[in-house]
Every structure is written in C-alpha cells, then in structure tokens.
Amino acid sequence: MATTPDIGAIIRSLRLRSIWAWTFFASAVPAVIVGYGLVGTSDRLRDVGAVMALIFWLIGMIPAIAAVVGAFRHWDALPDRIRFLAVSPMLAVSFSFSLGVLSVVLA
C-alpha cells in the first residue's frame, strides 16, 4: 500500500537544501574577489581564492541539485513559492553559465 508523503516535511527539506545551496554560492563571492586579485596582488593569494571559489560552487551544487530533484518529484503538491525557492539555485547557476557563454561568444 502506497503512503502519501508528508508535504510539510518535504517543504522543510526543500527549504533547507535551497538555503544551503545559496549559502555556499554566497560564500564563493569573497573568494572570487580575492581570486581575481581585487584585494591582493600575490599570485598565490589569487590561486587560493580561485580554488576556494570553485570548491564552494561545487559543494553548493550538491544541495542545489537535491532541491531541484525533490521539487520535480513533488511539483504538483508544492505551493508556488516553494517551487521557486527550490529551483532558484539552479536558475542562478544556469543564468551565470549563460552569461559566461555570451561573454565568450561576443568577445
């Protein structure tokens, strides 16, 4: 017999995953600033900053993907605001990649 999922628990887990994804993405911003040398002039500092930004983005992708998969699994049962919250980290990533591709193509 199939049981219905607890929508409240699903909403809480999607919120938590989205918040963690946004936290890691936001943590990458200071590392990007250091990585591009806007703060320091040392080559080693730039390398460490760029690597740290990449690590934060990759770690942030894990909860972002988990939130999107969970949202798509229960899409019809979720309120609109939770749907948007759950897919917003991946929307930001796809928007960033689109801007990067456009800048490479148009440069």
Image: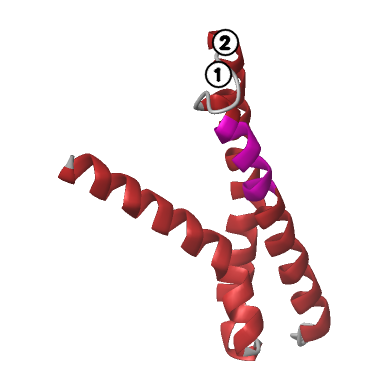
Measured as percent of width and height from the top left, residue 99 is found at 33, 52
The dominant secondary structure in magenta is helix
25 vs 71, nearest the viewer: 25
The residue at 76%/76% (across/down) is 10
- Residue highlighted by disc 2: 42
Question: Which part of the image, by quadrant, shows the N terminus?
Answer: bottom right
Dot 1: within a 10 Å radius of its alpha carbon, few (fewer than 14), some, or many (20 or more) residues?
Answer: many
Q: With respect to residue 56, does 102 lie above or below?
A: below
Measured as percent of width and height from the top left, residue 8 is found at 82, 83
- Residue highlighted by disc 1: 46
Residue range highlighted in magenta: 24-33
Residue at mark 2 to residue at mark 1: CA–CA distance = 6 Å
Indicate the quadrant where residue 70 lies.
bottom right
User: What's the amino acid at mark 1?
Assistant: Arg
Left or right for 31, reference 93: right
Q: With respect to residue 59, does 42 lie above or below?
A: above
**The residue positioned farthest toward the left in the image shown:** 106
46 vs 105, nearest the viewer: 46
The residue at 57%/77% (across/down) is 84
Q: Secondary structure at mark 2?
A: loop
Dot 2: within a 10 Å radius of its alpha carbon, few (fewer than 14), some, or many (20 or more) residues?
Answer: few
Kindly report which numbered mark, 2 or 1, lies closer to the viewer in this rendering: 2
Measured as percent of width and height from the top left, residue 43 is found at 53, 10
The residue at 33%/54% (across/down) is 98
